[in-house]
Amino acid sequence: MLDESPLKQFEIWLEQAVQAGLKDPTAMVLATVGENDTPRQRIVLLKGMSQGGFVFYTNLDSDKARAMAQRPQVSLHFPWNVLDRQVIIGGHAEKMTATESAAYFLTRPRESQVAAWASRQSRPVSARAVLEQQFHGIREKFAQGEIPMPDFWGGYRVTPQRIEFWQGREHRLHDRFVYTLGSNADWQIEQLQP
């Protein structure tokens, strides 16, 4: 039985994925369309749900951030293969406020905070040693006290417009249910053929 709210249904499935002991149930594929209409995918981590959206954090000058600035329509995909399940979310990505991002940044492990400063994500680097040198330099710079959030780092919230729940079944007669956001901000549920 599906919940009337796709967000509640997602939370149920996520909790089941956690309880099943999946290695990283919050790993999701983020698909964007960038320059020259080129689609790209990469794995990011779901860091929570806020204001009805799916939240992740990244460098604001990364390839994904630049693509979302041009085209905020994105797709998220949770491939819970061990459970023979997947969830596909289509929605609109928007930058979170600096205050929201900073609140999360301060909860990150110190080494992750240093890494956010050290890496200019998606930019070329001549050798791994250069990246490690940048990391050590930043760690020394911020050896005392709290590490401030870089102004080039922050969060995104993907507000869903469509969420599909896929459950594998025998004989490839899979269950597929799609929630689509209606014009009255209510969710319509349809079952799709596999």
Image (spheres, rainbow, N blue to C red):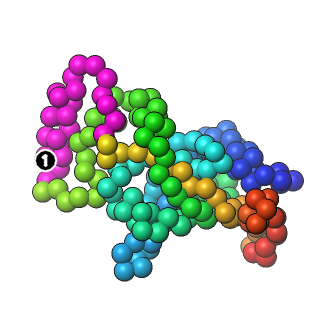
For the C terminus, the image quarter is bottom right
> Does dot 1 land on a helix, a strand or a loop?
helix
Q: Amino acid at mark 1?
A: Val
Residue 30: x and y in percent read: 49, 60
Q: Residue at x 39, y 58 (%)?
A: 65
Q: Residue furthest right?
A: 1
Horizontal side of residue 5 vs 84, given as left or right: right
86 or 34: which is nearer to us? 34
Q: Residue furthest top?
A: 144
Quadrant of the image occupied by residue 37: bottom left
175 or 65: which is nearer to us? 65
- Mark 1 highlights which residue? 130
Residue 143 is at least partly visible in this image: yes
Q: Residue at x 13, y 40 (%)?
A: 133
Q: Residue at x 68, y 41 (%)?
A: 15
Horizontal side of residue 63 vs 11, given as left or right: left
Numbered-mark total: 1
Residue range corresponding to the magenta coloring: 127-150
Local packing at callout 1 (Cα closer than 10 Å; few below 14, some 14-19, many 20+) is few
Q: Residue at x 83, y 53 (%)?
A: 4
Confirm whether the magenta stretch covers residue 147: yes
